[in-house]
Amino acid sequence: MTKHFDREMTVLKKRILTTGAMVEEMLRESVRSVEQNDAAAARWVIERDAAVDLYEVETEEECLKILALYQPVALPLRFVAAVLKINNDLERMADQAVNIAERALRLRDRSTPGMRVGMHNLAERAMDMVRKSLDALVELDKAKALEVCRSDKEVDDLYRTLCESIETQIRANPKDLGPGMDMVAVLKNLERCADLATNIAEDVVYTVDGNIIRHPSLARRTNP
């Protein structure tokens, strides 16, 4: 049974990585659709969402099958439980990418270059957190997971700064209210992806040592 279990766990790990790769590509293309007014890229992201939804359901079924057939304990049990949650977080990231793509279609015929300044930096930081959180999962690297958690504040701060900049531009040019609100929504979607990456990182920490850090009151004092 051990060989079969190990094989199932390897397949599960590959599945969650595949989902992660799909979501990363959707995020990249959604950001590009805004930056380059690329309607084709935006529509590709929107159409791609169904594939991620299907993969999420299949991965969830795989997790439940492993729990039912092998009844894992300790770290393997925590890993499967983490994948169940991370699987859902990745699907929600795909939804954020779709939201960005839909805003890109609304912004396509509006000239708002000043409002898009800084968006690329925020997107790169958020996507870097996504990549590192998935790497931490595969490698069961607690240090890398904690690094992701620490990065979240930087993204939050940058998000607020960019939103304040857009607010200033809208006050100077009230006619830009519509596109300005669309850009704020894009930034919020990116900030939300960083939050979801943090969720993944927190689940990695739990997988490694059973420590729940998403609620400070429950984290052990030994947590760095």
Image: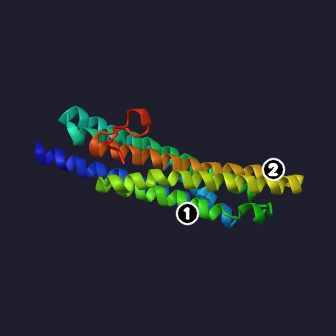
Residue 53 appears in the rendering: no
| SS state under label 2 | helix
Residue named by callout 1: 124
| Disc marking residue 178 | 2
Q: Residues within 10 Å of mark 2 (few under 14, many from 20)?
A: few
Give me the residue at 71% from left, 52% from top.
Answer: 163
Q: Are marks 2 and 1 in contact (CB under 8 Å)?
A: no
Alpha carbon of mark 2 to alpha carbon of mark 1: how far?
Answer: 25 Å
Give me the residue at 67% from left, 63% from top.
Answer: 118
| Residue type indicated by callout 1 | Glu
Q: Is residue 38 above or below residue 197?
A: below
Q: Closer to the camera, 168 or 184?
A: 168
Q: Closer to the camera, 19 or 116?
A: 116
| Residue type indicated by callout 2 | Gly
> In which quarter of the view is residue 21 placed?
bottom left
Give me the residue at 81% from left, 50% from top.
Answer: 178
- First in residue order: circle 2 vs circle 1: 1
Left or right: 174 with respect to 158? right
Q: Position of residue 125 (x, y in %)?
A: 54, 60
